[in-house]
Image (cartoon, rainbow, N blue to C red):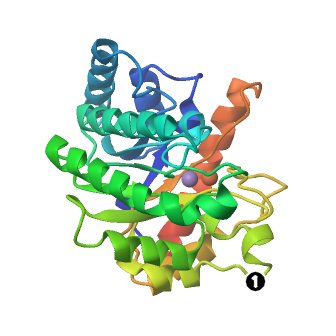
């Protein structure tokens, strides 16, 4: 996996470096990366269209000036908080679909080629018996989103599985079923984002949870990887160094290479607490990028 395929999700910049020039310079100069995944935590699709367009235009220009490619625009922490397309109320689901329509527009305004994120979560009350009723509605919503994506000039929609049984898809079989049910009915291809902190979450998948089954089952239908440091007991999103985490980036790189997926864009996705010292965040994100870059480059040579 060469450096061209390694980039960073802008979640690290939230609230601290929202100015496009600030994050663009950080990514290009300090981190030495060319590829970014924009997060809707920096710019919300719901914001009034005139302001949103203006801010998206500035972000797109700053990225271009710094030589950065905005690969995709992605659901962040804020929008993940809501039930999204699996809201128990029809009105909630309609609102979520409208959010995605705007997210597609914003992704296009940013010059990204894809839009994506987790799809939604059912309530505790609806999860046990509403899944089969909500599932076909979810399929229709994804199809609608891909229609808007095609019309906006995007090339794909990226879906991120999450390790919660109330969410769809949350395991390998469900991810395969979703693809099978969507295939041939979407206006742009649908592919997956495999977040290592989700795929290897042991409380749900067991102590022998591994990446290979995901890679083997989904193969080139994996469009992006999310890298993070984790203890496998939480969706940690830690960086390096972190005494709590023991995610092995070289092993990840070897597995991805072995599966023939070495060209898949891989984004470091690290979140820091709002109260953490700004300089400490800067130091950790810099060391995290170095750590991952070294590990990914080593697997290239070997
Ligand atoms: Mn993720
Ligand atoms: Fe996550």
| Horizontal relation, residue 139 to residue 40: left or right | left
In x, y percent, where is residue 298?
A: 52, 73
| Depth order, front residue of 37/207 | 207
How many C-alpha atoms fall within 10 Å of the one at disc 1: few (<14), some, or many (≥20)?
A: few
Q: Quadrant of the N terminus?
A: bottom left
At horizontal 68% and vertical 34% (from top left) the residue drawn is: 281
Note whether residue 90 is visible. yes
At horizontal 49% and vertical 22% (from top left) the residue drawn is: 18
| Depth order, front residue of 225/186 | 186
In x, y percent, where is residue 112?
A: 28, 43
In x, y percent, where is residue 139?
A: 38, 60
| Horizontal relation, residue 198 to residue 255: left or right | right
At horizontal 41% and vertical 80% (from top left) the residue drawn is: 219
Which corner quadrant of the image does residue 66 belong to?
Answer: top left
Which corner quadrant of the image does residue 264 belong to?
Answer: bottom left
At horizontal 58% and vertical 33% (from top left) the residue drawn is: 78
Which residue has dot 1 on it? 208
Q: Is residue 11 above or below residue 127?
A: above
| Depth order, front residue of 87/254 | 87
Q: Is residue 116 above or below residue 162?
A: above
Q: Residue furthest right?
A: 243
In x, y percent, where is residue 128?
A: 69, 62
Which corner quadrant of the image does residue 235 belong to?
Answer: bottom right
Secondary structure of residue under mark 1:
loop
């Amino acid at each position: 996996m060469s450096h061209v395929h390694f980039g960073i999700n802008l979640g690290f910049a939230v609230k601290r470096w929202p100015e496009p020039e600030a994050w663009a310079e950080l990514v290009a100069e300090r981190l030495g990366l060319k590829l970014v995944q924009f997060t809707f935590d920096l710019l919300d699709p719901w914001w009034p269209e005139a302001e949103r367009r203006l801010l998206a235009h500035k972000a797109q220009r700053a990225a271009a000036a710094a030589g950065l490619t905005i690969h995709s625009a992605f659901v962040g922490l804020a929008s993940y908080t809501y039930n999204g397309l699996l809201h128990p109320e029809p009105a909630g689901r309609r609102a979520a679909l409208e959010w995605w329509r705007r997210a597609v527009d914003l992704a296009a305004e940013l010059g990204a080629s894809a839009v994506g994120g987790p799809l939604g979560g059912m309530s505790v009350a609806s999860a046990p018996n509403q899944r089969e009723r909500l599932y076909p509605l979810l399929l229709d919503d994804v199809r609608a989103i891909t229609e808007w994506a095609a019309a906006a000039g995007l090339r794909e929609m990226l879906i991120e599985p999450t390790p919660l049984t109330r969410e769809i898809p949350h395991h390998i079989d469900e991810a395969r079923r979703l693809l099978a049910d969507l295939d041939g009915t979407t206006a742009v291809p649908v592919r997956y984002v495999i977040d290592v902190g989700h795929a290897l979450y042991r409380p749900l998948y067991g102590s022998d949870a591994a990446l290979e089954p995901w890679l083997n089952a989904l193969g080139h239908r994996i469009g992006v990887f999310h890298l993070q440091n984790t203890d496998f007991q939480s969706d940690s999103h830690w960086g390096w160094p972190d005494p709590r985490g023991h995610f092995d980036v070289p092993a990840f790189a070897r597995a991805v290479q072995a599966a023939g997926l070495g060209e898949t864009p891989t984004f470091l996705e690290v979140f820091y607490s709002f109260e953490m010292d700004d300089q400490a965040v800067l130091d950790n994100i810099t060391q995290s990028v170095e750590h991952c870059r070294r590990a990914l480059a080593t697997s290239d040579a070997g």
